Image (cartoon, helix red, strand yellow):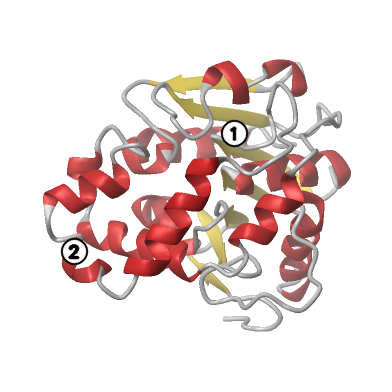
Amino acid sequence: MIKKPYWSQVIGEGEPLFLVHGMGSASSVWTPIIAQLAEKFKVVLIDLPGHGNTPLPPDHKMDPVALGKAVLEIADLYEFNKFHIAGNSLGGWIGLELAALYPQRIKSLTGLAPAGLWLAPYNARLPGSATSRLMAAGLRGAAPKLLKYEWARQIGFSSVSPKWRELPIELCIDAAVAMGTSTGYYPAWDAMLGKRFDKPISEEVPVTIIFGDSDNTLPAKTSQERSLLPKHAKWLVLPDSGHAPMWDHPDEVSAEIIATAKLAK
């Protein structure tokens, strides 16, 4: 386990696969698919700056390109010259930037509800994002007890997953604690303002994009602009799925990550 400068952990054997979480999240978000992927890959779990077990260093830039460079730092520490990457939300945007800027290092990319595909860049934080962060921060100590109740899980997760009733309680607790303790949440939000993904990606890098049909965080009308992606990108919409497809359809998502990696040359 490499703890400096960023928390990370490697599980399994095979070609390295980095799993990059979203804003206000942590590596624990990948729990439903880690075991399946570890049978095929050397899975690298990371906590981005100001998230999970990684503190926010002073003056650390939090835009997707800078966070992509943090991922590369971790890869260099493990001496992984080339690797696959799968990212959710902000993590998906980070993967897009890495694939565009460093195609010689990225073997394949699977973006799960990636951010950055807006019709137009945001010029202010979404009001709901501030509310979610404040609630999570205020209730983080009580989360383990509260989330044992269905009404609490409905309030916290029904907008994220149409299958919220089926989510393991521990997964919900981990997500709530991650949000409530994330010192990088607002800096990451502010670093995204005025930006969107707008770079070409080489055909040498296989790309699969997966959205849920019930994504309330990044809805299709405003946040899923396909023209920003390369023509060779595969685009999937999973039914009965929200902003975290790996929660709602772990088997399908794992299979797509594996299939995308097999396309790598």
Please, what secondary structure does the residue beneath circle 1 have?
helix
Decide: is 129 above or below 226: below
In the rendered view, does 21 fall on the left or right side of 194?
left
x, y percent for residue 170: 25, 63
Distance between the Cα atoms at labels 2 and 1? 39 Å
* Residue, disc 1: 260
Q: Residue at x 54, y 33 (%)?
A: 259
Residue 118 visible in the shown view: yes
Q: Residue at x 26, y 46 (%)?
A: 155
* Residue, disc 2: 146
Q: Are marks 2 and 1 in contact (CB under 8 Å)?
A: no
> What amino acid does circle 2 point to?
Leu
x, y percent for residue 247: 35, 43
Decide: is 66 above or below 143: above
Front in this rendered view, residue 49 or 112: 49
N-terminal of the pair, mark 2 or mark 1, is 2
